[in-house]
Image: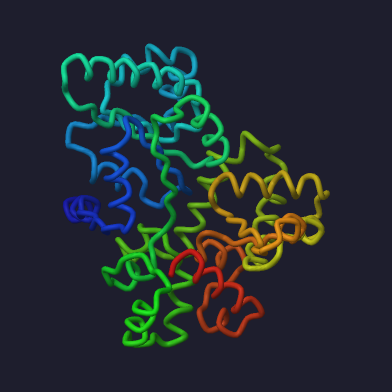
Amino acid sequence: MLCFFEKKIQKKVVYIKRLLEKDIVENIKSFPVILLCGPRQVGKITILEKLSNDKVNYVSLDDPLERKSSIEDPALFLENHKPPLIIDEIQYATELLPYIKMKVDQARLEALKSDVPSTCLYYLTGTQMFTMMKNVSESLAGRVGIIDMYGLSYSKIIGKDQDYFLPTSKRCKEREQYPRPETLEVFEKIIRGSFPALYQNENISTERFYNGYLRTYLERDIRNLIIIKEETKFLTFMSAVAARTGQELNYDNLARDAEIDNKTAKSWFSYLQTSGLIFLLQPYSNNPATRAIKTPKMYFTDTGLACYLARYSDAKTLEKSAINGNIFETVELFVW
């Protein structure tokens, strides 16, 4: 019985090839540092380990001891962890960035002297997108390639190897030849979402996965930002945002639903946006003044998480729900 259990644990995980691979490879060839930003569990480390060479080292700042070391003595930390190096969750120790810059500049000088082409030294990943962007742009300007990463595209979810969709007349005609999926089948994919783990092992319960995802998100990304007793209200707030995916952003409505004040609603919304769970689509107009005053629309970057928070676990119920149009608009924006 024990041997059987061990065999199940050691089952090989299937790697899902991503459209983003070409962009990452180009950045690896062009920059000494690359930064891969995106929500947790979208496959950032998996794709970097696949595309970087076999000798690349790895350290995660989720480890409290490694995090403490990187903050207290960044220079010693980088001496102990030699490049090429993957640093996971770099947002926890942005103190490392100036020291990474010095290491990169030193390596560039040595490469020039020896007439050897420089290579990518540091592969950084993180979830708090806006915080990192500010620090990276200040510390690593001209030295870093920045790439945003989200969940699987719909073509990957249904097992088709397609390139990015561009609305050219040729591509639209090609798509007309594809068999149209049943509406219920589409809503089943919407409820499952776009996280790779859910398609690497289809036996994973959607409810169990998203329950664990939210628990990890609260413990690692949110708990140091809000008072612990407010976690229940924060989850209520997330559910209110999920129920309004695809709608115009209205802080008053979100604050009312979560029973918090408007200021707190704005602050909590910024946490979701920084974590890559929410995307704001700015309005378009030929008139810049009109663009500035119109309200943006908000979208969850994963429909499965949005459905879980909004308490939709059945495709038939979702198809007939009041949010079916908005959730379909969300999947068109982020998965199609």
Residue 139 sits above or below residue 330 on the image = above
Tag count in the figure? 0
Residue 130 sits above or below residue 59 on the image = below
> Depth check: 127 or 295 in front?
295
User: In x, y percent, where is residue 67?
Assistant: 45, 24
User: In x, y percent, where is residue 60?
Assistant: 38, 32
Which coloring applies here? rainbow
User: In x, y percent, where is residue 140?
Assistant: 44, 27
- Left or right position of 196 against 11: right
Q: Which residue is drawn at 71% across and 65% down?
A: 248
Residue 90 picture quarter: top left
User: In x, y percent, where is residue 16?
Assistant: 27, 59
Q: Residue at x 40, y 74 (%)?
A: 168
Q: Residue at x 62, y 34 (%)?
A: 224
Residue 255 picture quarter: bottom right
Classify the position of the N terminus by image quarter: bottom left
Classify the position of the C terminus by image quarter: bottom left
- Left or right position of 177 against 239: left
> Depth check: 245 or 311 in front?
245
- Left or right position of 122 against 264: left
Residue 306 picture quarter: bottom right
Q: Residue at x 23, y 46 (%)?
A: 50
- Left or right position of 280 against 250: left
